[in-house]
Image (cartoon, rainbow, N blue to C red):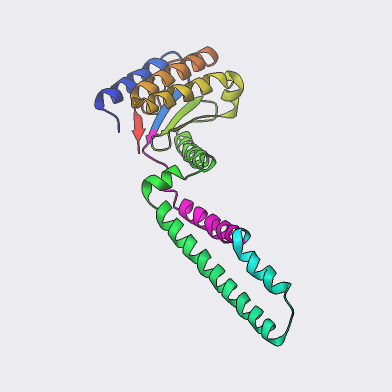
Amino acid sequence: MLKEADRDRISAAITEAESKTSGEIFCVLAHDVSHYREVPLMWGAVAALVGPPLLVLMGLHRLALASIFSSWSDDSARAMEGLILRVLSTYGLLQAGLFLVVVLVVSMPRMRRAMTPGALRRHHVRQAARHHFAAAGLHLSRSEPHVLIFASLADRRVEVVAHHNIHQAVGEGPWAATVAAVVDGIKAGKPGDGFVKGIGICGAALAAHFPPDGPAKNRLPNTILET
């Protein structure tokens, strides 16, 4: 995903930023965080539930109204029963057909990606970022400030994760600027540039609130993890 030159630049940017703070910065670049297999099923269910009622409203109800307001007899009652059975059978087949067709269409990778709601993307990217943050935190104590910059290329979404005490000290401004920098780099086809700029923003924020307190511990690697 990244060129070797970009990896070297990112590593150098992390080293430079950490030389001015007691904090640690680590970066993860994921190609994607989910295959979103639930999306075709979701849209299939929506089509199956919404499509047939719309067709009924568009015309099928006229047949029912015509029968209801006609004179009732044994023949008309039997005709009504037959009509109801045909309508219900058609309704069920239409639902099943719509569900299957929409699931097959939305299952195509590009279509599935395009039809994935933004809220679902945010949820999956945030969950993946928190997973990596928790895993990295096993090597550090809560008193050691550390920040994760996590990006998903396919989703074009970025999460900056840090402990609550760091958020309180730094505020939301630097994190929002970091997210914007990395997203801009991804959209421009230059994720390396985005990460280098984002690392610089995070480093400056950490340096302002968490200055060096001795030799750099460097408990986390100064390289970007690609998954």
Residue at 36% x, 25% y is 188
On the picture, is 86 further left or further right than 14? right
182 or 7, nearer to the observer: 182
Give left or right: position of 162 versus 192: right
Residue 172 in the image: x percent, y percent?
58, 22
Quadrant assignment, res 61: bottom right
- Most foreground residue, 111 or 159: 111
Outermost residue to the left: 4
Q: Nearer the viewer, residue 67 or 114?
A: 67
Start-end of magenta stretch: 29-56
Q: Position of residue 154 (x, y in %)?
A: 39, 38
User: Is residue 75 visible to us here?
Assistant: yes
Magenta-drawn stretch, dominant element (helix, strand or loop): helix
Answer whether residue 216 is visible to the viewer in this image: no
Question: Which quadrant holds the N terminus?
Answer: top left
| Residue 219 sits in quarter | top left
Q: Residue furthest front?
A: 71
Q: Is residue 219 above or below residue 134?
A: above
Q: Is residue 129 above or below residue 206?
A: below
The residue drawn where x is 34% and y is 24% is: 192
Left or right position of 208 against 80 = left
- Give residue 91's position: percent from left, percent from top: 56, 68
x, y percent for residue 8:
28, 22
In the rendered image, residue 31 lying in the magenta stretch gets the answer yes
In the rendered image, which quarter contains the C terminus? top left
Magenta span includes 10: no
